[in-house]
Amino acid sequence: MTRKRRGAGRAAQGKAAVRPASVVGVREMHLEREPNLARRILRLLGPGLVVGASDDDPSGIGTYAVAGAGYGFATLWTALVTFPMMAAVQFTCAKIGLVTGQGLAGVMRRHYPRAVVFPVVTLLALANTINAGADIGAIAAAMNLLAPRLGIGALIIPVGLLILALQVWGSYRLIASTFKWLSLALVAYIAAAFFAHPKLADVVRGTFLPHIQWNAGYVTTLVAILGTTISPYMFFWQTNQEVEEDIAMGRTTLALRRGTTDRELVYTAADVNIGMLASNVVMYFIILATAATLHEAGRTHIGSAADAAAALAPLAGRWAEVLLAVGLLGAGFLTVPILTGSAGYAVSEAMGWRYGLGRSPSKAPQFYAIITLSTVTGMQMNFMGINPIAALFWTAVINGFLAPVLLVFVMLMANDRRIMGERSNGLGANLLGWTTVAVLVAGVAAMFLTWGKT
């Protein structure tokens, strides 16, 4: 949220009464003002699309590449299974933000004991820090592909400090609008999958006939896929961005932000569904491309960014590494601020501190201190001698452990009429939401049960 837009919102509030969120939603207002159909569609897209794009972060890319190379087409079916779960979860989070006018941690602080809220928020901040550190390492590895003479270690600090500077003194909207286009380079995996000429029967079987291998490696990979597609940071970021959009429209008080409209919920669902669908399409084709190239060639282990780039060779040839590097740079610069920012939102709301990317550091010092601490700690992780691809994969596994815990609270809040009123979850949302919790818990349990089995 840019400070200029926020200032404009306040100026508008001074000139005329701001309509509350219960009367007209942000997306509704945007669409009302735009007569051009193409621009109306673009204005419909907001936090849902950004969250979907961030889901294909370096951690996701590394996890999908490991899955495709290690197990071929056997995990393609996960893209079909995770899409409805992702969409349901993210819409529920968005609805909580729209109805309450607060982020998840703020709602939890109002309705749950501190003994519950603080451990959950602490775990989120730790998971996000580890994830951010792995993604910073991946950005450095991508730059190393473009400039091999520069070691990955030498790039970690400049990359981390650049991201931090952009986040603290710049505008996340500027970062997102710039780097989301670079992340489109990942679409090359779609073309690469076709250029590799995979066997159609194997692809169809892997997509529509789930075959679970009861060994530690395969089950851990499934947990990693679930953890990187249904990531805890996405819950917090989605909710807080709905709130930030309201603040940018001049709704600076909680009373003005509370409530939403039927039409706004319809537009929000469209935004979220489009974002999650785009994310899962990229996920599907990364698995497919790496399965059709690396796995088929017997290269079942991915140990570096160069290995992951090899899956693009049928399409890009010697430019494969450049293409992956651009995609990793875009995805990383898009996602790291979301990871550290969602940690800042969660901790600040839980503690009752001022927060928001629309505020200057002097007006929200603790919020920016959390972001700084998370970024610097993540940078330091990269000097512990951990393989970057392994770090990305195990980050996804950690998220797989944390996601069901946080999702239980999301579902409880979404069904609490004290919080949601008449907007509490219906049968369909509950069925998908609690099924997601059950699937995540089952995945973690299966991982424990299969440890030690080859």
Image (cartoon, helix red, strand yellow):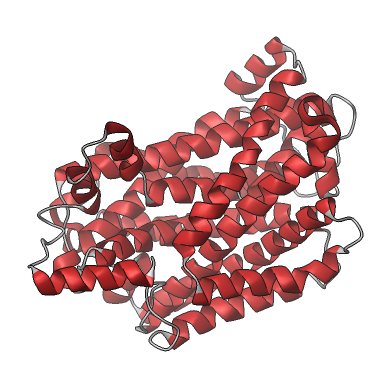
**Vertical placement of residue 331 versus 426, above or below:** below
Whether residue 232 appears in this view of the structure is no
The C terminus is located in which quarter? top right
Residue 345 locus on image (x, y percent): 43, 72
Q: Quadrant of residue 79?
A: top right
Task: Name the residue at 86% across, 48% down.
Answer: 303
Q: Position of residue 424 (x, y in %)?
A: 21, 51
Dividing the picture into quarters, in which one does residue 327 lie? top right
Residue drawn at (72%, 58%), measured in percent from left and top? Answer: 139
Q: Residue at 45%, 60% (x, y): give it.
A: 173
The image quadrant where one finds the N terminus is bottom left
Task: Say left or right for 367 vs 337.
Answer: left
Name the side, left or right, on which 269 lies relative to 159: left
Q: Residue sitting at 57 percent across and 57 percent down? A: 335
Along the horizontal axis of the image, is 383 left or right of 441? Answer: right
Q: Which residue occupies the foreground of this view, 16 or 391? A: 16
Residue 304, percent across and down?
84, 49
| Residue 33 place in picture, x, y as percent | 19, 46
Total number of numbered labels? 0
Where residue 318 sits, quadrant-wise, is top right
